[in-house]
Image (spheres, coloured by chain):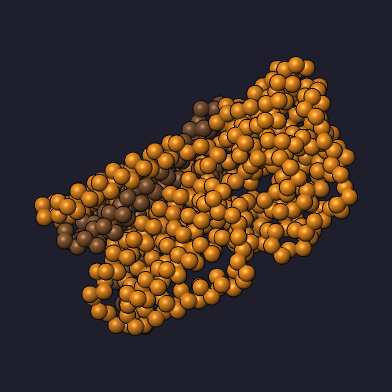
Chain colours: A orange, B brown
Amino acid sequence: MISLNILEITYLIASLTFIVGLKMLSHPDSARKGNLIAAAGMLIAIVATLTLYQEFDSGKGLNYGLIFLGLAVGTGIGTVMAKKVQMTSMPQMVSFFNGMGGACAALIAIIEFQHHQHATVTGFDGELLVMLLGLLIGSVSFAGSMIAYGKLEGKIKDKVLPMNQAINMFLLAVIIILIGIQMFNGSDPLLFYALLGIALIYGILFVMPIGGADMPVVISLLNSFTGMAAAFGGFLYGNKAMLTGGILVGSAGTILTILMCKAMNRSLTNVLLGAFGVGSPGAAKTGSSDQTVREITISDTAVLLSYSQSVVIVPGYGLAVAQAQHVCHELEKLLEEKGVEVSYAIHPVAGRMPGHMNVLLAEADVPYERLQEMEEINPRLANTDVVVVIGANDVVNPAAKNDPTSPIYGMPILDVDLAKNVIILKRGMASGYAGIENELFFYPKTRMLFGDAKDSLQKLTAEVKEV
Amino acid sequence: MELLLEYLGNNMEMIYFLVLAILLGVEVISNVPAILHTPLMSGANAIHGVVVVGAIIVMLQASPDNYLALSVGFLAVVVGMLNVIGGFVVTDRMLEMFKKKPKKS
């Protein structure tokens, strides 16, 4: 009994660390410490559960052996994966780990269901409902996260099934019916596993049609789903650490999802129903095709940059893909030495996740104060000599300001069209993730520099040295 | 209906927890700068790894000859721990990037 009380107290401590940790994570100065505090709380909760949940029972040597083996295997794989992953691949890594959490919640529900089958309850069965919800949300989160992971890794292509939305609605209805039947008629293994299967399919079809640019929002949403699934697990066991940790992430994750949508000036439904590029009139080519783009050579670019007063670099996902952050920093240093004032303009949703560019450029040792947020830099863009856009597209598309039919209309953008010159580093004329043509490319002050971002920047750096 | 009320009544304490924790979660996350969205999401991702505690409890409750429960539970412990460790390590790596730079004045 005493050990159980101690266990409850450790759960209280763990819950507190989760709350404090999350709070600290939302401020730049304390973020890292907050993460460590939450991790410490997690360690306490795990160790306490292992040692205090039941008095050590020698008959369960096998159980303990398997638990420790499982913890060791999970720790080993997790550490290696998290340490080895490239900074550019962070978003899909988060998605992957999130899927693992969802799978864990679903597996727990499956085992608990085995136990539950022996108990016969007629009528409303709260325990069963909690179990079914844990199974449902856990498996949707798992399947969805795996698809999001595959998409960001480039292993799965965006694919929209015909009537995808209708199919999703239908599946959702089936899910509700399956849960309803079990609520009234008691549990049935067949129905239980049917629910599992349909939940997995639903998770896949839910994420499948959503475009790559919206993936962060989806991952954040699935993250809060897993939180809820964990909370249902906590409810099942009356475990307060699981309940607080889970539901905290569930609600905080939902708010975070909404904040991310706000940064893109779009509603969550708009993101989930996949309005980008599908069926919206603005997605059709707006610019008349007789417009031509002007190219610029490496040496001309080098001269232009070297004799400028101020240069603003706009990094986008193309920079991340090309792994060009280091050479980009090199170019910036060279220009600084020549007395050019260089800063980076970071759009809130540049890259694949908010903050993605900051992390990437920080990795390349770009000084923090050089990174300017959109609100800071926009008023200064009119006085900028050259804006260099590296692998960004939608975040500088003027259509967001002047074309009400465009799917991205209303999204705040970097006003690079105000600058005196715009140079765009791009692979080709393909449109961005939103699938919209960018009229900026056809502006008289715009010059295109085609090629791989890293390659172009390397040549550019060499050329600037010569000037 | 009676059973529903009974269930709610029996679990009132947990329901209080649930409601308060929801409000707390909303409160804690207000006003986050955009650059912290990714690390914050990642940190929250690690925190819901607490579900691994449930997996451990399942394992401790399972009888040693119930091989089905043991193997599924083992898998649950592995993936749950992956979530915890991977989540915290990735978050730390992201935040480390910010840390060594001079602070924004």
Q: Which residue is outermost to the left?
A: A58
Asked which quadrant contains residue A405, the reply is bottom right
Q: Height in image: A161 above or below A11?
A: below
Left or right: where does residue A238 sit relative to residue A348? left
Q: Quadrant of the N terminus of chain A?
A: bottom left
Q: Position of residue A91 (x, y in %)?
A: 53, 46
Task: Please tell me how many numbered marks the rendered image carries.
Answer: 0
On the image, which quarter does residue A39 sit in? top left
Judging depth in this view, the residue of A195 and A385 nearest the camera is: A195
Front residue (pair A70, B38): A70
Q: Residue at x 85, y 38 (%)?
A: A294
Q: Position of residue B9 (x, y in %)?
A: 32, 73
Q: Residue at x 39, y 57 (%)?
A: A103
Q: Is residue A439 above or below residue A406?
A: above
- As drawn, is A228 to the left or to the right of B33? left
Q: Position of residue A212 (x, y in %)?
A: 61, 52
The residue under the point 69% across, 53% down is: A434
Image quadrant containing the C terminus of chain A? top right
Is residue A55 at least partly visible in the picture? Answer: no
Q: Residue at x 36, y 82 (%)?
A: A184
